[in-house]
Structure formats: C-alpha cells, structure tokens
Image (cartoon, rainbow, N blue to C red):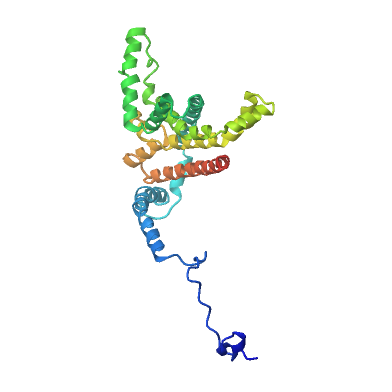
Amino acid sequence: MTAVSQGVPAAHAAGTPAAPPAPPPHSPPSATAAPAPAHRVRGALAALGLVPFAAYVLAFLALPTALAVGSGFVDADGGLTAHNLSALADPVVLRTFGASLWLSALSAVVGALLGAAICYALLGLRPGHPARSVVEAASSVLAQFGGVMLAFAFIATIGLQGLVTLWLKDGLGIDIFAGGAWIYALPGLIAPYIYFQTPLMVITFLPALTGLQTQWYEAALTLGDTRAGFWRHVGLPVLAPSFLASLLLLFANAFSSFATAAALASQGAQIVPLQIRAALVSETVLGRQNLAGALALGMVVVMAAVMWLYSRAARRAARWRR
C-alpha cells in the first residue's frame, strides 16, 4: 500500500520536511504573545502622563533633598569633608533636636487620642448623616489649615492683644501671659500643632475604624463575650497597627512643619527647621557654612526611620482590609 493511498502527502512520505500546520482561523492569542502595537502605544501615552509629576517630584523634592544632604559633606572650598557632621554633636543642636522630637511626639499623641475619640463618636452616626458629613468635611479642610494662616488665627485669638486674651483680662481679671509671652516660644507651638494634627488623625484613622466588621462583634457576643471583651480581644488588636501608622504619620507631619513655627516664633531657633533657617540666613555662623546641610541630614535620618516604621505598620494594618 502506498503513502498516497494512506492519506499522507507524497513529499512527506519521500523524506521532504513538511510545512508547519496553519493556525486555526480564529484561535485566541497565547499568554506569552507580544502585546499588540495598539497596546504598546496606549501604554506609552499613559507613561507620558506621569512625566509632569515625575519632573515636579525631581525638581522640588529629590533635587533639593540631595543638595541639602550633599552640602553637609562639602566644605567652604567645595572639598569633601565630614567636619560638618560634628555639628550634630553640639549641645545646642542636640537640645534643638530634643525639642523637635518632644514637640512632635506630644502633639502626635494628643492629636491621635483626640482624633480617635472623634472617630469613635462618629461610629454612632450612620454614613451620610449630616453631622458626620460636616465633621468629615471640616477635618479634611482643617488638616490643611496650617502655616501663616493658622499662626495669624492664634495671634488674633490668644495673642498678647488677642480677642480672647483681652476678654479674659478685662472681663474676668485673668492674664494668661502673666508669666511671659509663652505663645511666641516653644510652649506656644503645642496648641497650633494639635489643632492641625487632630483633623489629620480623623481622616486617616476613620477608614480603619469603620472597617471593623459587624459580624465580628456579633460572633463575639454569640460566643459569650462582652462588649468590653470584644474590644479587648478583637477590636483593639485589629486597630492597633492602623493607630500606630496614623500616630507615626502625625509625628512626621509635626517634625517637618516649618511655616507655623516660623510665623509664631520669629525669635530664636527652638526647633530644627527654624535652626536650619537660621543657619541659612545668619551672617554670624563662622566656620560652619554648611551647618544647614548637616542639620538637614539629621532630619532625613529621623524621617527615614519614621517612614520605615510607618511602612511596617501600614503593611500589617492592610492585612485586615484584604
């Protein structure tokens, strides 16, 4: 019997390589196939949309940070040196860093506790309730109400000649500045910092608190637990990473704040940002021309540690949102 009679082409039967089989007319593309040109064009256009943002971040964040940190390792003649870093061990600089850390930690803890209490109170209102909507909207606005505007508001309210100050002094005989003009020193920064830290805590912690499942509470009660037991065994452990992440965010926000402190405490350099400003504009700093760069390097180290802890806490908090 010949090959032709068995249905096999004669060339294949004679040892000639056969042509590859043609693909089916409407076969789907394989997973490893190269993307179509139209997809590549759309991807390139989408990447071009990020160019303005990338240029903005590079010009106003990455480049200034690199210059500020790099100047800490350069002397007046442009040579590399580590002498500027010795300023970080100066007692005055250490006290300034201690004041910044103390102010940031205090305002972060107080703001976090007040914000968490407001979030817990909002749980009693259904989503979309007018009061809840007003609090959420006000928190979003007040969290950004900082800088010179906030300093002016405090000066006009409780400054030396503020409205409340004169009312207390003339009407009730209470002089809140009997011990000195504390509002223009480090203690005067506590209230303004808490003012913008509390609404920031509300807008960052409220999503985590509202994410608690009602079924968890019902299951705890079904198993014989109490309301306090639910919060002790379930609620607080679940919310602890989110609370810690929000607390670290508030700390970083306060540690890097400048405008409010610069507008209120115009004299002296009580915190690190103000000391950097003094090092940049002062004409009496001799032999430490790049002191601002060394101080900026110290701030970058602190902020990097805080952001690393924040990423760890945020990653752990995200497990309950999956």
Q: In which quarter of the image is the C terminus?
A: top right
In which quadrant of the rendered view does residue 276 lie?
top left
Q: Against 187, is 78 above or below? A: below
Please state the horizontal and vertical placement of residue 157, each as a whole percent of the image. 33, 20
Left or right of 140, for residue 247: right
Residue drawn at (34%, 16%) of the image: 164
* Residue lying at 39% horizontally and 55% vertically, measured from the top left: 79
Taking depth in this image into account, of 194 and 188 the one nearest to the observer is 194
**Which residue occupies the extreme top position in the image?**
172
Count the numbered circles shown. Answer: 0
On screen, 14 above or below 108?
below
Please state which of residues 244 and 19 is positioned toward the viewer in this rendering: 19
Identify which residue, 282 or 3, lies in the foreground: 3
Give left or right: position of 126 versus 214: left
Rendered location of residue 51, percent (x, y):
35, 54
Residue 67 visible (yes or no): yes
Residue nearest the viewer, comparing 45 with 306? 45
Q: In which quarter of the image is residue 8?
A: bottom right
Q: Can residue 159 be seen in this view?
A: no
Location of residue 95 in the rendering, given as x and y in whole percent from the top left corner: 47, 33
* Residue 316 x %, y %: 57, 41
Whether 290 is drawn above or below 216: the answer is below
The N terminus lies in quadrant: bottom right
Residue at figure coordinates x 38%, y 19% from the top left:
180
